[in-house]
Amino acid sequence: MAIEAKKSVCRWCHARCRVLVHSQDGKLVKIEEDRTDPRVDQILPATRGCVRLLGAQEHVYHPDRVRYPLRRKGERGENKWEAITWDEALDDIADRLGAVTKRFGPEALMLTLGTGRTTEWPLMRFLNLLGSPNIVGQNQICFGPVIGMAAAMMGWPLRHRSGMILSEDTDGRPLTKCAFLIGIDPSQAVPRLWKSLRDAKQAGSKIVVADPRRTKTAELADLWLQLRPGTDAALVMAMINVVINEQLYDRDFVARWCHGFDQLAQRVQAYTPEYAASITNVPPGKIREAARIYATNRPGVSINGMGMEHLEDQQEAIQARLILAAIVGNIDVAGGEYLPGPMDIVGEVEMQLNEMLSPEQRKKQIGADRFKLLAWPGRELIAAENKKFWGQESNVVSYAHYPSVLRAMISGNPYPVRAGLTIGSNPMLTAANTKLVYQALKSLDLYVVKDFWLTPSAQLADYVLPTTCWIERPELYCTYGNNTSIIAGDTALPPQLAGEYDYRTDYDFFRDLGMRMGQEGYWPWKSMEEAYEYQLRPLGLSFPQFMEKKNGLYFPPDEYRKHERKEGFATPTGKLELYSTTLEKLGYDPLPEFHEPRESRLSRPDLAADFPLTLITGGRVRPYFHSEHRQIASVRKKHPVPRVQVHPETARKFGISDGDWLWIETPRGRIKQQCAFFDGIDREVVHAEHAWWFPELPGAEPSLHGVWNSNVNVLMDDDPDRCNRRSGGWPLKTALCRIEKCS
């Protein structure tokens, strides 16, 4: 049979590169970048040089990949399995899940979801039809915080940072005159933005970076603000102070389109650069310089990453960041921060069937009574304004509070949670407080994992189900509704091959499970392609027609200043809310305020006496994507062991040399990583890599593939009392720790 090439969308990071997958007789031959994609040259490193993509053959045909459904034979954690058919697995799971929901109610099922690994609406559709409000995952610490805050303030989320590039005019010159980046290193995490920043800098745009570490992005900047971890809100509030007091704001935009400027101006008077300097360790002169650069080089963008989203006061810091962008007139203008509005197709929100989850079940969402903004109470307020203004909802996903759900699994309070599904995630690596996660997963009556591998989490399951890689399923990527573009791809390799493997998409799994649990009338599409055709109906195209006539790509032109055409914003006041009436209705402070982290050298001097250093984690490390790719030999070769960045003077103080293995210990536990001397970090701060496990180590307990050896989440706290007051996000940047050379 001749070699055929199909266009597919890579999901091994958030860049969503379009690629050509060449195959023969259903076997992968090679993958190359799709030169018909207009984004193909807007990325660094280039798609053709991506180490993950170069390892595709290893991934697809890896001997450790889960190929058929597995059912546990021994005790949980013994790594004893038997292969069964999909019908056997689905019948068993439906029966056992049905028994749980009959006894305890549908809310007794929780589902963990990863970040951007799959098409998410089918699993939310299943949960809504079943009646469970308890989906958990990274929403409170990854993308969700800025999506929710922007929707509350402006009536729709801003353009998703994973697809952001700085705007250019028709001659290729940058329209964006300044980029202010806070807690994000695009050189490691956002390759399209990294390429765009480098190009803009070369063309004369200004770049300001706030980060505790001297990253590659910080080295590119005109000004680097090395702030103390956890103090982002104080820094940005001081910048707002300068912009207002020096009258550098856009008076016309503020007067016509903003609500609460006077209250904001009063609040920030306390945040002088001198006061903020005493908190952040950034000199007051640099704070003033940063504010002036950003405010006088318009239009500009401000972009936060998970460095900000991993803070105790993430929501307050993000609100301040968005306020800063708003008062200088950088919202929904060419070269500024784009407010996209609804898509031109049926979006993921409509596909989720949120209306099927009753008000009674919504009220049962664990943690929603306390952490409301990114749960059902916040979503309902935002959705109501969306519908009045836009005619549809934005994709502000409502999640239960992960740490609170884990505690309910163990304690039964506020009610029993007895079953769990894990889709595209690895809770034992990616949820804080691993010891608690372990205890919670082991307590379940039913635990099902759908994954490529027997991960540490999968080793604790009753069933492990094989899943399709992006090469083995179709794609209609809509940026979670936070952009207007569509990127589509065909199924490039067969998901089933007789005698070799039987993978299923997540859509297939939830449809088949739903059909066994009384949801027959709500899954009319027999395949993902049929569902995608339903979504594409407003464009008058079937999925094959979209691939053929549109090349599977849709990039409508940006429409700016929609607030002028539509006479306002989708908020209760009809204006961009600097003073958030939505937060006020939820019982929170409507304006941002800095809060000292509840575990820091200042707030806990008693603890700091024994744990004198501040541990931060979560910084991206190419070539990995969180906990993925550790078993891919060509990828692992590039970065074989976990490394912790330590200032050379600090390391020598503890008798540690570059390359030594050292213990990192917090009040929660200790792990070991290899010391990497780094003078671009404060002497009182260390940065440990996250999501490390060792697939080559035994899967059975107590090892669980080395999950206890170097996994930084063993050290991190998820105490609800330390989580963000509004969203419930848990802190990953301010743990107190100590280090010691491994003997």
Image (cartoon, rainbow, N blue to C red):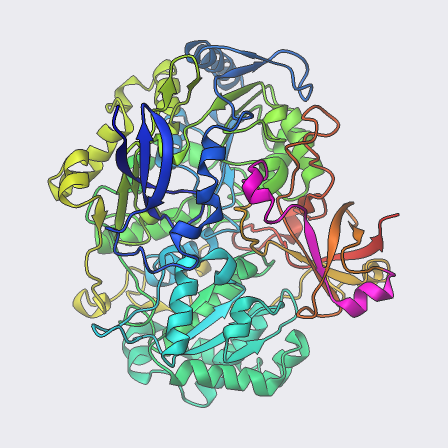
Q: Position of residue 353 (x, y in %)?
A: 31, 34
**Membership of 645 in magenta stretch:** yes
Closer to the camera, 570 or 743? 743
**Please, which residue is most extreme toward the front here?**
2
> Which residue is at a point 22% across and 43% down the rendered structure image?
552
Image-based side of 427 in relation to 533, left or right: right
- Image position of 435 with respect to 62: above or below: below
Image-based side of 1 in relation to 660, left or right: left
Res. 601 image quadrant: bottom right
- Image position of 621 with respect to 171: above or below: above
Residue 134, visible in the rendered structure? no
Q: Position of residue 158 (x, y in %)?
A: 35, 60
- Image position of 604 with respect to 488: above or below: below
Q: Position of residue 628 (x, y in %)?
A: 54, 40
Image: magenta residue range: 628-655
Q: Position of residue 19 (x, y in %)?
A: 32, 44
Closer to the camera, 19 or 484? 19
Residue 432, visible in the rendered structure? yes
Image quarter where the N terminus lies is top left
Closer to the camera, 674 or 313? 674
**Please, which residue is most extreme toward the left here?**
540
- Image position of 429 with respect to 705: above or below: below
Image-based side of 177 in relation to 709, left or right: left
**Membership of 535 in magenta stretch:** no
Q: How many numbered marks appear?
A: 0
**Please, which residue is most extreme toward the bottom here?**
246
